[in-house]
Image (spheres, coloured by chain):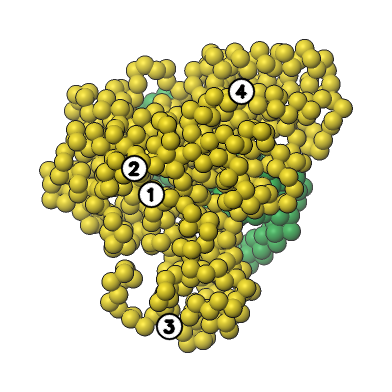
Chain colours: A green, B yellow
Amino acid sequence: MQGNSSWDRQLVEKSIDSLQDKPGALLPILHSIQDQLGYIPSDAVPLIADKLNLSRADVHGVISFYHHFRSKPCGEYVIQVCRAEACQAMGSRQLEQTIKQTLGIDYHQTTLDGSFTLEPVYCLGNCACSPSIRVNDDIHGRMTTSKFNQLVDKMQTVAVEVQ
Amino acid sequence: MTHSPLKTVAEQAIRVYVPCDSAALSVGADQIATTIKALAAEYQANIQLVRNGSRGLFWLEPLVEVETADGRVAYGPVQPEDITSLFECDFLSGDPQHPLYLGLTEKIPYLAKQQRLTFQRAGIIEPASIEDYTAYQGFIGLKKALAVGPQAIVDEVKQSGLRGRGGAAFPTGIKWQTVLDTPAKQKYIVCNADEGDSGSFADRLVMEADPFSLIEGMTIAGIAVGANQGYIYLRSEYPHAHQMLNKAIAVAYQHGYLGNHILGSDFSFDLEVRLGAGAYICGEETSLLESLEGKRGLVRAKPPIPAIEGLFGQPTIVNNVLSLATVPIILEKGAAYYEHFGMGRSRGTLAFQLAGNIKQGGLVELAFGISLRELLEEYGAGTLTGRPIKAVQVGGPLGAYLPEHQWDTPLDYEAFMQIDAMVGHGGIVVFDDKVDMLEQARFAMEFCVEESCGKCTPCRIGSTRGVEVIDKIRAGDNIQANTVLLTDLCDTMTHTSLCAMGGMTPYPVMSALNHFPEDFQPTNPKTGGC
C-alpha cells in the first residue's frame, strides 16, 4: 500500500515484534513499515534500534544506503521512470523530461496535492518492451508521451472519485 | 488446478492462455484476459482461461494461445480492440484467417530454432501449478539427487561444465565442492536474484514462468552441500516475481517439496524470499550477504570467500537464479547431455536477452558459440526504429559497447575477454545510429557514482571525477589532455577497485572512447547535451 499515513507507533512496534527474530531482520522490518506507511518515519528509528540492539546511526545508515527506502511521506502514486540503457536506447531521456514537465516535479519530489511522487529507477527488467515506467506495483512498457498522459488522466480521475 | 495434461474436469472447455508475466502485463495482458472472458460469455464459448508464464517472445506480447487438436496456436501481439474480431474469426478453433495468427507456437521460427534447457517449461505451464511442473519432468532431478547423495551431485555439476550464469562465470561445481568440504554446523544456499543489469530479464522470466525450477535447484544444492536453509535475495523492482515465488514456495511446502523430511527422506530444507531495496551493488555477492544480514550493502574484501565464510560467517553457496534453475536438468539428463552444448570452456546454453532498440526483443536460449550478428539479425531482425545499428552493449551497464566489426565474435566467455568485452549475464542492448556515445560513456560513470557502495576510493571518487572529465571533453576543454586523463583514470579504477563495480565501469567508457572517437570531438555535438 502506498499513501501518506501518519506516524503510527503501534503499527511500527507490531512490524518490529513480528519480524525481529528473523536472522538479519532489519531489511524485512523496514520493508514492512514502508509497505504500510509509504515511508520510514524518523520516530521509528530509535524503536527499531532499541529492539535490534543497534545504534540509531546503524539504522539510519541502512535506511539512507538503499534507494528504495524513503524518510518522508510519498504521494498516492509512486512513479518510477527507468533510466537504464535499454530504455535510453528507446528514448527514455526525452520521456523523463516530458514526465517531469507534465507532473511539474523533479525526481524525489511529490506533487503539492499529494498525488504523485517521482523517482528514478535503474532497470525494471522489462528491457525488451522499453521504455518502461512503474506506477506503484504495475509496470507499463512501450511507454510514450501520449500513453503517459492518458495514464495520468486515469489516475487523477480515480483519485477524484475516491474523494 | 485441474488443467494438467490429464484432462479430468471440463472436458469440453477450450484452454486459452494469456501470460501473466511482467512484460506481458506491462503491455496490457490483464485487460486482454478480462476481455476474452467477457466475450466468451457473450459468445457462449466454454473456455478455460489459463494464466501461463511468458515464452519470452516479448515483441509478440500479449501473446494469446489456444489449445487445438494439433497443439497450441498463437495470436499476437493482441490488443483489446482485436478480441471481437478474434471471436468472429473463430480463433477458438485455431482459425488461420486472422491477421494476428502466428501458427503453432512451437513452430514460430524465433522459438523453434532455440535450444531450451533452463527455459524448457517457460510459458508452457501455469507457473505455480505443481501438477504442471511434475507433468513436465519436474522434480526428477531432485529425486535423483536424494538417491545419489552429496559427492555424486557435486561431481555431476562439475562434469557438466556449468559456470555461474550471473556474469562472473566461476565453475559452479568447484564452488559447491568447497562448501561441501568445509565442515560447519550451519550452511546456507543463497540465490542471487538481484538482476540489476539493464538488458537482463532472464532471471525474472524464470521466477515468473517456472519458479519451481529454482526451488528444485536450490533444494538440490542444499542436499549437495548439507545446507538446510536457503534464501532468495530478490530485487524490490520485481513485484510480480516476488508474488509468484511466495506462491510457489507455499505450494512446495504443502506438497512436501520443502520443509522437513523432503519426499520422506532425512533431508530438510527451508526457503525464504528476502527483498533487496534498490541497490545495484547488492548483486555483488559479498555486498548481497551484508544486505541479507541486515546491513548496508558494503562490499567485503576477499578472502575469505563466501564458500568458506559467507552468510553469518558460515559456508555459503551464492549462485545466480539461472545457475540454480539449470541444476535440475543437469541432474535429470546427466552431465554429458548438458556438456555437449557449447564451445571451448563455455558449456551448455546461455539465455541471451535481446533488448533496447530491437524489432524482435526477447529471450533466446542457445548453446554458447553463436555470434552476436546472428542474434541481432536472425532473431532480433534489426532495430525497431528501422535505422542502422550503431553500438551494442553486451553484459549490462558494466559491459563494453561493441561496434559492427566485433559482431562476429562468438558468444563465449573467453572469446569476449579477448576483445575487452564480457558476455556477463547475456543481456544485449541495441542502439541505433542516433546514439551519442560520449553520453553513454558519461552515463556509465554517473551510474557508478549513483550505485557505488562507497567502500573503496577508486570507485567512489574515480566515478565522480570520470563524469567531470567527460564533461570537460564535451565542452571542448583541452580534449587531448583530458582524454589521456580519462584513460589513466579508467586504468586506475580497473586495477585498484575492490569489486567489479569500479573495476568494470571502464569497459563501457573505454569501449565508447576507443570505438567511437568521433563522438568525443567538440565539432560533433549531438542531441542530449550534458
Q: CA distance from mark 1 to mark 4?
A: 34 Å
Mark 1 near mark 2, Cβ–Cβ under 8 Å? yes
Labels 3 and 4 positioned on one and the same chain: yes
Circle nearer the N terminus (3, 2): 3
Q: Quadrant of residue B483?
A: top right
Number of the front mark, 3 or 2? 2
Labels 1 and 3 positioned on one and the same chain: yes
Q: Which residue is mark 1?
A: B117
Residue A20 at what x, y percent from top left?
33, 37
- Please name the residue shown 28% across and 77% down the image: B8
Circle nearer the N terminus (1, 4): 1
Compared across the picture, whether B186 is left or right of B48 comes to left
Q: Is residue B29 above or below residue A11?
A: below
Residue B217 at what x, y percent from top left?
30, 44
Labels 4 and 2 positioned on one and the same chain: yes
- Please name the residue shown 33% across and 80% down the image: B10
Q: CA distance from mark 1 to mark 2?
A: 9 Å
Front-most of residues B386 and B13: B386
> Residue B338, which numbered label?
2
Secondary structure of the residue carrying numbered label 3 = loop
